[in-house]
Image (cartoon, grey):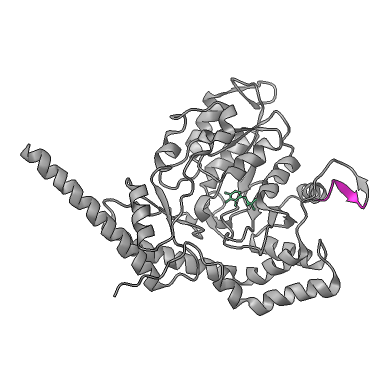
Amino acid sequence: MKDSTQIPFVDLIAPHSELREELLAVFERALETASFVGGSMVESFERDFAQYCDTRHCVGVANGTDALRLALMAVGVAPGDAVVTVPNTFIATAEAISQTGACPEFVDIDERTYNMDSMKLQEYLEIQCDVDQATGRRFTKTTRRPVTAVVPVHLYGQVADMDPILEIAERYHLFVIEDACQAHGAEYFSNKEKCWRKAGSMGHAAAFSFYPGKNLGACGEAGAVTTNDGKLTQKVRMLRDHGQSRQYYHDVEGFNSRLDAIQAGILNSKLKHLSEWNSKRRQNALQYSELLAPASDNILIPYEPSWSKAIYHLYVIRCANRDALQSSLAAAKIGTKIHYPVAIHLQEAYRGLGYKPGDFPIAERVAPEILSLPMHPYLDFEQQTRVAQAVLEFTAGMNASKNRSQTLSASA
Ligand SMILES: *Cc1c(COP(=O)(O)O)cnc(C)c1O
């Protein structure tokens, strides 16, 4: 008989029942000491997460979007600036830019990795910008905005190709803020440094989200900024806490974006398991890729360059008949999602930026074809086999109808 239990897209129950006692102890400790905001649990998580990311500093904040926005503000991105990112990302990347008062500008992605194409970044700076001869800084040709920062996104848990991005940023005087919200623990082999580097340790600063579904997730909302720069650390610390340098002395106008002590305690408990969870995800990805190999005519599996150790926040395949594939998996009780169905420059919210279809052809070409399969550390071999079987059955159907139409046109 066919197994007909639901295979969920993500399992947030299993890790929490496994760590139940530890997590409850965190809550008890917070109750006993009444430390709910800031305090030793936040400090100890900041220390441990910085160490995990190979950075000198980490500042806990309220969520990943704030982490990006406060990092951008801390490096000095100002209203009226232009900040470059990619159109294939979660909307928060662009919101963080526009909410500093800067204007998000986009460059297209690499078709194989779905991450920023450094050649496109270079082209953008050379072709769509003018140079100020005195300072060497770039301005957008049409709106005369100074281009001050770039936000590469480590999408799906794979680091963007950072060597060329960092080199271009240095050449054109741009700050680099990594959007590492999907990439806790992902690694990148830098040919320039001749070593593996952790996501979040390469730019001037980086943003992490600990939204429950991320590889390291809180039991609520949380985020963090990592950096090696002590001055930036101080600025982010001030910005997250009403701009105060000490209590009730407000040097700048800030925000309330502090990290909850309970969330920090929970994150620190889970951080001890992150490496193991990430390697389980990598194993599962490898397993999927082997199981799906027979469908290679119709299904593109994720591409992991030799310089990348991805942590598979998502396992994203590509198929020309994506919507039909998704329905057929749903009928087989397999949960899937789409990350993301509409590129940012074509979202209603950013209509005011004036982009049109065709502006970023690669992001637009992949959006209707990508599909995220179930992926989490507790996914077992049987479940993966069932998912792969359902995909293979669907592609067999695709091939049969292709052959049919070929036979028909040959006989016509
Ligand atoms: C999750 C995510 C964010 C935002 O994080 P929140 O904690 O939800 O604010 C930003 N960028 C990317 C790529 C994300 O996946």
For residue 209, above or below residue 108: below
For residue 68, above or below residue 136: below
**Furthest-bottom residue in this view:** 21
**Furthest-right residue in this view:** 248
Q: Which residues are magenta?
A: 241-247
Query: In what quadrant of the picture does the N terminus appear?
Result: bottom left
The one nearer the camera, 59 or 204, is 59
Q: Residue at x 55, y 26 (%)?
A: 354
Q: Residue at x 53, y 44 (%)?
A: 89
Q: Where in the figure is residue 172, as x and y percent of width and height?
A: 62, 32
The one nearer the camera, 207 or 51, is 207
The one nearer the camera, 224 or 24, is 24
The number of numbered discs placed on residues in the rendered structure image is 0
The one nearer the camera, 261 or 119, is 261
Q: Is residue 198 magenta?
A: no
Q: From the viewer's perspective, tell me whether residue 193 is left or right of residue 381.
A: right
Q: Where in the figure is residue 313, as x and y percent of width and height?
A: 51, 58
Q: Is residue 246 magenta?
A: yes
Residue 170 visible here: yes
Q: Residue at x 54, y 24 (%)?
A: 128
Q: Where in the figure is residue 46, as x and y percent of width and height?
A: 73, 62
Query: In what quadrant of the picture does the C terminus appear?
Result: top left
Q: Where in the figure is residue 314, as x and y percent of width and height?
A: 48, 57
Q: From the viewer's perspective, tell me whether residue 63 is left or right of residue 274.
A: right
**Furthest-left residue in this view:** 411
Residue 175 visible here: no
